[in-house]
């Protein structure tokens, strides 16, 4: 994912990536799924707007999933919500292979995958007022202060994402880093197109399953903060 320096002039804009491409290894099953299923469930990045109805072959609410990791949460939500379609964005190939493996195992038809920088996908492929919702679960917190500029959920990105939501559409963020949670809350509150559904942080919605990592952290006393905002 890429964060654009909003203070730069258009001619001198520089991009700061909010991710690092790791040299992760495929398991054999992930490799097979990636090679055999990505042509079916993948959508190539383009600078042209994506026809979401055509991409999924039906008219249904469209939910954006940004940075799905190994895909367990995305697959679980898509299985539990068959009447919704999920456009999932990830840059790491083993994670995409993992989600494709789950799509095959669960026989899911309501997921499509774009392997590309999420900021560029949102800017170029998604038209304004097209999404019923967006999920950003456990984005990289970039904990060192000098790296905070790499954090994804900054004001420019949040504004662009809010524009892609339909009126009444929702933005759901979850993080296990308290300082990032406080920063995100302030950023979302400052965006005039968004309204908080809670006084501050929200209870975890039932549709977001607990991951193994999250369960382990909760047992150790670590916190998780959910934020749920709606498009005005």
Image (cartoon, rainbow, N blue to C red):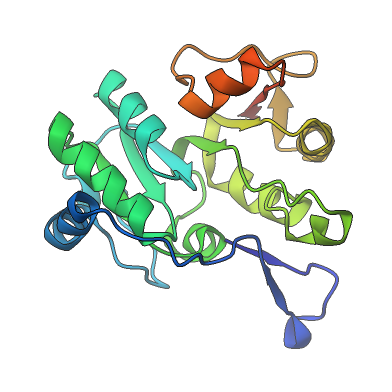
Residue 57: image location, x then y, percent: 16, 44
* 113 vs 21: above or below: above
Say how many tags the image has.
Answer: 0
Please name the residue shown 40% across and 30% down the image: 73
Does residue 158 appear to the left or right of 126 in the view shown? right
Q: Residue 199: which quarter of the image? A: top right
Who is closer to the viewer here, 53 or 8?
8
Quarter the C terminus occupies:
top right
The residue nearer to you, when weighing 156 against 21, is 21
Q: Is residue 58 visible?
A: no
| Relative to 165, 218 lies left or right | right
Location of residue 44 in the rendering, given as x and y in whole percent from the top left corner:
30, 67
Residue at coordinates 39% horizontally, 43% vertically from top-left?
A: 70
Could you say which is closer to the camera, residue 101 or residue 5? 101
Q: Quadrant of the N terminus?
A: bottom right
Task: Give the residue displayed 63% in from the left and 53% down from the top.
Answer: 160
Q: Give the image quarter of residue 102.
A: top left
Closest to the observer: 193 or 125?
125
Expressed as whole percent of the image width and height from the top left, the position of residue 90 reads 43, 54
Q: Left or right of 86: which side holds 150?
A: right
Work out whether 158 lies above or below 181: below
Does 8 sit above or below residue 56?
below
Inspect this view and state whether residue 139 appears. yes
- Residue 47 screen position, x and y as percent: 42, 73
Left or right of residue 72: residue 69: right
């Amino acid at each position: 994912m890429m964060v654009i320096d909003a203070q730069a002039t258009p001619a001198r804009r520089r991009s700061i990536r909010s991710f690092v491409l790791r040299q992760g290894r495929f398991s054999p099953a992930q490799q097979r799924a990636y090679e055999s299923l990505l042509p079916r469930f993948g959508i190539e990045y383009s600078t042209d707007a994506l026809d979401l109805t055509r991409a999924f072959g039906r008219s249904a609410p469209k939910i954006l999933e940004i940075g799905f990791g190994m895909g367990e949460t995305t697959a679980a939500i898509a299985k539990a919500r068959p009447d919704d379609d999920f456009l999932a964005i990830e840059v790491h190939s083993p994670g995409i292979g993992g989600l494709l493996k789950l799509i095959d195992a669960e026989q899911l038809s309501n997921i499509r995958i774009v392997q590309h920088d999420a900021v560029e996908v949102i800017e170029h492929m998604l038209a304004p007022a097209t999404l019923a919702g967006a999920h950003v679960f456990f984005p990289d917190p970039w904990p060192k202060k000098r790296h905070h500029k790499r954090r994804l959920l900054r004001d420019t990105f949040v504004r662009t994402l809010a524009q892609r939501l339909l009126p009444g559409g929702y933005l759901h963020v979850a993080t296990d880093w308290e300082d990032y949670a406080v920063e995100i809350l302030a950023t979302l509150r400052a965006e005039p197109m968004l309204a908080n559904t809670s006084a501050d942080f929200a209870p975890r919605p039932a549709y977001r399953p607990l991951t193994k990592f999250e369960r382990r952290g909760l047992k150790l006393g670590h916190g998780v903060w959910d934020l749920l905002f709606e498009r005005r």
